[in-house]
Image (tube, rainbow, N blue to C red):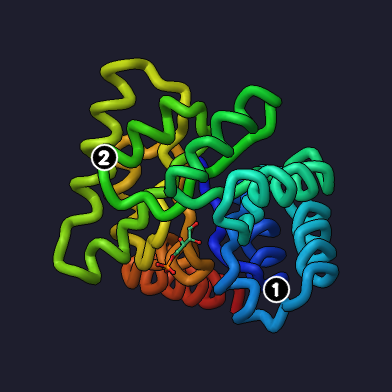
Amino acid sequence: MKFFIDTANLNDIKEANDLGILDGVTTNPSLMAKEGITGEENIINHYVTICNIVDGPVSAEVISTDFEGMVREGEKLAALHKNIVVKIPMIPEGIKAIKYFSGKGIKTNCTLIFSAGQALLAAKAGATYISPFLGRLDDVSTNGLDLIAQIRLIYDNYMFDTQILAASVRHPMHIINCAEIGSDVMTGPLSAIKALAKHPLTDIGLAQFLADHAKGNN
Ligand code: E4P
């Protein structure tokens, strides 16, 4: 399973990248605003900075909600760097835009997926990735992991190339469960990625090894 980090925070991106296990980055307009990145020029520059840190797909989201606007924005974003993936919302105009970009060989990530039907449509339009938001489904008492499993089944039935990018990941168990289901990618915060490495028995065991080594060297 590929690991993407879901943030526009450059320190977090660098820290995850330095671990050597990072495959890509996803952002969204809220994550950009959270880092104080506003205005078209700053946003564009930020995407380029991220692309220069991580050698992997970087999702950059369009703001337009009409086909022409999405195409205009998406083409501009895609021209910024070879690793840019144009992130497009799951709305009818978005499906048209995904189909258009797919014909042009431009990679897309269909975002705000909350149902299997939406995932099916995006795959038929040729999306490179689809982002089911599992944490946000959990937030409304609906099992987000069930949706990932349902999409996995449908995509396998028809051998769709579209990759399932489990999004809105909140904690390490989400990551483990996504890996069990066979999600192609997961995107989550640095905290969830780092939490995978933590185990109290590892800490206790290491402390003991170091203490014993120190005794032997006294
Ligand atoms: C997906 O690409 C989104 O950026 C993201 O995963 C949303 O997560 P949230 O529900 O934690 O905001």
Q: Which residue is mark 2?
A: 116
Eye-nearest disc, 1 or 2: 2
Q: Residues within 10 Å of mark 2 (few under 14, many from 20)?
A: some
> Can you tell me whether the CB of the residue at mark 2 lies under 8 Å from the nearest atom of ligand 1?
no
Quarter holding the C terminus is bottom right
Q: Is residue 100 above or below residue 210?
A: above
User: Outermost residue toward the left?
Assistant: 141
Badge 2 marks a residue whose secondary structure is helix
Q: Position of residue 16 (x, y in %)?
A: 62, 61
Q: Which residue is mark 1?
A: 11
Q: Is residue 51 left or right of residue 157?
A: right
Q: Position of residue 154 (x, y in %)?
A: 26, 27
**Can residue 20 be seen by looking at this rendering?**
no
Q: Kindly identify which numbered label has been placed on residue 189.
A: none
What residue is at 32 percent from the left and 16 percent from the top?
158
Q: Position of residue 60 (x, y in %)?
A: 66, 54
Q: Amino acid at mark 1?
A: Asn
Count the labels in the image.
2
What residue is at 36 percent from the left and 56 percent from the top?
133
